[in-house]
Structure formats: structure tokens, C-alpha cells
Image (tube, coloured by chain):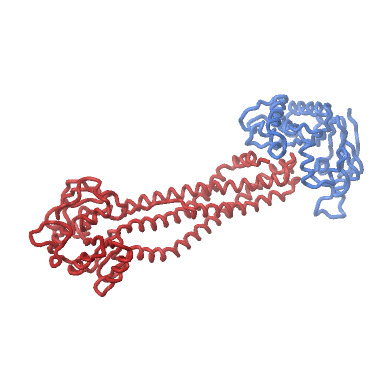
Chain colours: A blue, B red
Amino acid sequence: MLQLNAVEHRFEGRSAKAPPALNIPSLSLKARQLTVIRGPSGSGKTTLLYVLSGLIRPTSGEVRWDNVDIAGLGEGARDRWRRRSAGFVFQNFNLIDEMSPLGNVTLAAYFSAFSDRGVRARGKSLLEQFGVADEARHVSSYSRGEQQRVALARALVFDPPILFADEPTASLDEANSAELCQSFKRLAGEGRTVVAVSHDPLLIDAADRVVTLDHGRLVERELVA
Amino acid sequence: MNPFPVVLSLLNRNRVTLIFFVVLITFAVGLGIAITTQERAVRQGSARAADKFDLVIGSPGSPFDLVLASVYARPAAMGLVDGAMLGQIMAEESIDFAAPIAFGDSASGYPIMGTTPQFVEHLSGGVAEGRLFAAAFEAVLGANVRLDLGERLHAAHDGFDSEEMLHEGTIEVVGRMARTHSAWDNVVVVPVEQVWVSHGLPSGHAPGDERIGPPFVTDQLPGVPAIVVKPSTVPAAYGLRNAYRTDSTQAIFPAEILVQLYALLGDARAIMSFLALATQVLVVAAILSGVMIILQLYRTRFAVLRALGATAGYVFLVAWSYVALLILAGAVLGLGLGAGVSWAVSGYLEAQSGIAIPVTISWQEVQLVLMLVGAGAALAVLPAIAIYRQPVVEGLR
């Protein structure tokens, strides 16, 4: 379970009198749930996602995963934690265009201690599972739906217990969005903690829980399903 | 950690710009390599061309002119050592031989050098084609002379080809010297007697005696502009040099003239080498500023690597390797280009002068390239630090 306790974050250079970018007294995100964070532009959705994933260390407070306070870790330790424990899916996929789908999926093997052979086998299996042909051509020549599925396979290559997604359906058509929502549902059902920032009604409808933010504060907690 | 797959993907992007950067480095390095290798090749080639000219004696005047005329077959207006002195030198006991060198004429555009069969043997080790001259009006060709055996040549005062300036009679080509790798590969060599007789002088032998080469009859010897002496020992060489440094003769080791020349050129070489290295460093610095801009275009990519769990150290390694590889590629290609240009220049100079200009890649060039690669690797830290310090979240926005 991902647990936030008394988390407050202020960006450097902002006035001390200005309200914090994020102010969350308590928030628990459970395994086996797809949680969608929503809110108006500038409400702190992405900041919350980055705090949860350890990309941002909050000014104060705890971000706990199991018994580890991620916010208390140094930068290198947070990198390692993220590599072991979390996968990331982005709005614009953020794939390396000049690599093949498999090259992108196994990218993290280049900066981790995992065996390349094992990672390649899992990468191939994931691509097959998501219906993406493993060809040598550059991933940029694939359709947008396929690219997002490659990005999802990349996020899952080390079988992390947490999956973060930032507006994952924003660049997709309705059919591909629906397929991605189903994938997220299934991944949560397999026991993962899936957290997505999104405005997409399809994803919100698919969510087990919707968290709404405004001006960095939780305004409602809603269990959709 | 393996940064290279990511580095290669980055290199794959902006290929045209990156190729342009590498080409710039290649040319800067190539220029430096060409300068240093060519300078050394000319030095070694000119020294080797003078190897067979142990001691040269001439009339007082410029020692440079004496060396240029006798060793490098660049005839100059020079005074003559008189016949009596030539006879005295040839009679020295501490020499293996002394060969008179006469010049100033040309045939079919090639300089004519008059000397003895003995010196031709000494210089070339024998003929590659035909035979050595055996009569006054026979000639052997240098290895690069584009004339045929059996041709008959008309000798004329050098630089004049009008009928009035032709000497009487013709010279028959009877052989071609083996390659000497000296300026003598570009000349027509005749017996010294031919030069004397064609200028209306005694032949060095008794009247009616048509022999060529030593021994000569002293009172029948005309003067010559240069005499090449092969001393029998090193001490004898120094003794002869001192003995013939007189009011009427100068005696020089061509090597000592070359040493003076190289000393003069040495400063210029140091300056050129410094300028070449400075140019390379400036080019690399200019390119680094361009690379920094390009790397900024990849900041989202670096941020994504961090989001996927890459450490800041890995991102630093990728950025550093990217820049260092560009510089390394340019430096290695530059080494090849410089050597290639130097070989081409040597080929041209060799064709012009006959002197073999041997191009070699030495430790000096390797050092030059290593210094540049080292400087580049050090400078590559700057863009790598810029990427390393970039906030991940900003890159993801």
C-alpha cells in the first residue's frame, strides 16, 4: 500500500506566503485498485504523481511503501526503488524513436543489474501479450495505439507492484483508450497498485477509486466501483 | 551499466548535424597530423638523400648553394675548384674516392650531372637497365627520367633550348640507374669528361686518350664546381673537412648544413604544431557548445530515463559518452585523413624532386590525437554535468 502522511510540497523559488503546491494530510492507495487522480489544470495532480513515485521529494511528510519512507531516501536510493518497484506510462509515450519495440521495452536493463537474457524473454512475452509485432524497425513507425502498448510493456518489464500513468489515454483514440483502460483494470486485478492522472471519462469509469484534487488539496475521495 | 544502446539511439538522431561536427573535427585533426608528418617526412627524406654525399668540397661561397647543387641537383651559379686542387684532392690517401661533379647543362628538360662511373656505382649500386656509361658521349638516366634507352640527347646550357645554345654532338642513353631515392633520380648522368669536352675544355686525360673516369692527368684537369669525397674513416672525414676549409675551397658535411636548416625549421615546426593543436581544441570547444544545445533537445529523453529508474550517474555517463564518441570518431578519422593527405603530398613532392619523402605515423601523432581526445573527454564533462543537474520533473513537463 502507498501511504501519504502529512505531505506538503512547495516548489523552490515560490513565495513562502503562497499556498503549497500539495497539501495532503493523509492518503492511502491500495493494491488491487486502479486509482485515478483528477482535477483542474494546476491542481497538483502531476505533482502528486511525482511525489508518489519518488521523482519529487516533498518538502515535508512521509510517502510510505510497505515499511520504507520513500521521501526519506536519497536520490540514488529513490532511483533504485523506482526501478524495482514502479513502472511509468506517459501521455506522449516517451519511447526512444530510434529503437525497436523490444529495445524500448528492455531499455531499463541497460541501467539495472537484471540479466539481459531474462529481460529480453519477458519483453518479448509482454509485446506478444499486448499484440505488438516484435520487428527490428523503429518504434516511431508503429501506430499510436501500438506505441502506448509498447510503453505499457516497458513499464511492466520488471513486473513492478506499482504502475504510475500520467494522462495515458490523452494521445489515443477511443478504441485504443478503451483497450488501455481494460489493461489497467486487469493489471490492478493481478495485485498491482495502479495510479493514473487522467481526465478521461473512460479511465475514470474504469477506476476503482477516483481522487480529486484542487489547489493541491484533496477535495473528495470517491469509490467508483 | 551499458550506456551505448542509448548513446547510439541519440547519435542516430540529428545525424546530419553530428556528421558535420565529426567532419569538422576530422579536418582540424587531419591538418595537424599532415603538418607534423609531412615536416618529419621532408626532414628524413632530405637527410636520406644526402647519405651518399659524405663530404662535399667546392669553391668558397654559400654552403647551402653547394649542397643544393651537388646533393639536390639544383644547379646554381658557383665558382670552380681549379684542376690542380681537384688533382690534389683525388690523390689524398685518406679517401676511398673523390668524384668531380659538373653541372649546368640540361637535355630534354632534365638536368645533366657529370661525374665518374665510380660515383654512379656508389650512389645507385649499379644500373637497373642497360649498362653504365663507358664513353664520354654516353649517359645513364635517373629512375624517374622519362626517356628511353637508345635515345640520343642534345645537351644545352641549362634553361636554354634554342639551336644556338646546343652543344655539338649527341649523347646516347645506354642505361638507367637503380633508384637512389635522391634528387639524382630526376637527372641525366654523363661522364664528367662529356661536360668538360662539350664546353671546349680538356678531358682530364692525355690528348687522344678517350678513357673516362680516374685516374686523371692533373695538368689536363679543368675546374669543377663540386667534388664529392668518400673519406675512408670518420677521423679522416673531419681531417679533410678542416684541411680544405681554406681561402680557395670550402669543405662541408651536407648533414651539418641540414642540421642548421632543421634547427631553423624546428622553431617553425613547434609553432605550427602548437597552432594545429590550438585549432583542434578551439574546434572541439565550438562543437561542444553546439552539442550542449543538441543535448538540451533530449532533456525529455534523459528525464524519462530517470523516471524509469536510471541513476543520475547513468544519465551523466550517456551524455559524456555521446560527446566523447563524437570527438573520438573525429580524432581517429582525422589521423587517417592527415596520414592520407601527407602521403599524397609526399607522392607529389617525390615526383617533383625525386627525393623519397617517407611518411610515418609516429608516437608524436598518436600523442597529438590522445591529447585532443583527452581534452575532448575532459570538456565533455561540461555538457554531461549540465544534463546531470537538470531537474527530472522539468524534463518530463
Image quarter for residue B100?
bottom left
Q: Position of residue B45 (x, y in %)?
A: 36, 55
Query: Residue A105 in the image: x percent, y percent?
Result: 70, 33
Identity of the residue furthest to the bottom in this view:
B247
Instruction: Name the residue: 55% across, 43% down.
Output: B16
Residue at the spot x=65%, y=40% of the render?
A: B6
Name the spot of residue B269 as percent of width and height, x first: 45, 61
Residue that sits furthest to the left in the current view: B208
Pick the front one: B152 or A21: B152
- Count of numbered circles on the image: 0
Residue A5 seen in this snapshot: yes
Q: Is residue B56 left or right of residue B13?
A: left
The quadrant of the picture occupied by the N terminus of chain A is: top right
**Residue that appears at 87% across and 50% down:** A19
On screen, residue B31 versus residue B223, left or right, reads right
* Position of the C terminus of chain A by quadrant: top right
Left or right: residue B150 versus residue A193 is left
**Can residue B64 be seen from the camera position used here?**
no
Which picture quadrant has residue B65?
bottom left
Could you tell me residue B205's position as x and y percent? 12, 61
The one of A82 and B237 positioned closer to us in this rendering: B237
The vertical placement of B101 against B180, above or below, is: below
Which of the pair B21/B2 is nearer the observer? B2
**In the image, is residue B136 above or below residue B7?**
below
